[in-house]
């Protein structure tokens, strides 16, 4: 009977579902770098051309990191509302480590990329990154990292 007094609380713990709090998103103000296009074909934007960037990240007015990367134009259809489709890869340098992201974007102001890894504090990170461009050289990056 002593064994059952021991097993009951142990089994109870094993089969109890624990609620895990959702992580708080990391939010940064962004100062975007000047637009840089590497034009590899016919002059002007087109399939195969690449944009490169090195944006600055801020929290409470203090510079705390950067986001650097490139996007290759995979579709250019000037007659459409969002004429560009781009395949993008970037690394965000943050306090405590880096976060790597990639995905498909358009020239819509809101872009969502997948977190594919990280280093330091963010080693093995997964989740999403949302980048909202304000249209004036500034924006907001929100990282939603999974526990």
Image: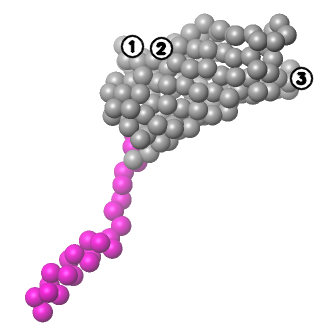
Is residue 58 at all visible to an observer of this figure?
Answer: yes
- Residue indicated by mark 1: 63
- Residue indicated by mark 2: 56
Ranked by sequence position, the earlier of labels 3 and 1 is 1
Ranked by sequence position, the earlier of labels 1 and 2 is 2
Q: Nearer the viewer, residue 26 or 72?
A: 72
* Region of the chain picked out in magenta, as a range: 1-24
Residue at 34% of width from left, 24% of height from top? 95
Q: Nearer the viewer, residue 90 or 81?
A: 90
The Cα–Cα distance between marks 2 and 3, rounded to whole angstroms, is 32 Å
Is residue 82 at all visible to an observer of this figure?
Answer: no
Disc 3 and disc 1 in contact, CB within 8 angstroms:
no
Residue 114, quarter of the rendered image: top right
Q: Nearer the viewer, residue 94 or 22?
A: 94
Q: Is residue 8 magenta?
A: yes
- Residue indicated by mark 3: 79
Mark 2 element type: strand
Disc 1 and disc 2 in contact, CB within 8 angstroms:
yes
Residue at the right extreme, as displayed:
79
Indicate left or right for 79 with 85 as reference: right
Mark 1 element type: strand
């Amino acid at each position: 009977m002593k064994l059952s007094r021991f097993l009951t609380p142990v089994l109870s713990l094993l089969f109890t579902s624990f609620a895990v709090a959702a992580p708080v998103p990391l939010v940064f103000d962004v100062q975007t770098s000047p637009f840089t296009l590497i034009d590899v074909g016919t002059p002007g934007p087109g399939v195969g051309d690449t944009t490169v960037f090195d944006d600055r990240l801020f929290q409470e007015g203090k510079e705390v990191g950067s986001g650097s990367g490139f996007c290759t134009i995979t579709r250019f259809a000037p007659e459409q509302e969002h004429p560009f489709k781009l395949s993008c890869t970037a690394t965000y340098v943050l306090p405590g480590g880096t976060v790597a992201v990639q995905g498909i974007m358009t020239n819509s102001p809101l872009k969502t990329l997948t977190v594919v890894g990280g280093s330091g504090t963010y080693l093995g990170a997964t989740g999403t990154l949302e980048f909202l461009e304000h249209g004036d050289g500034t924006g907001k990056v929100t990282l939603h990292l999974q526990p």
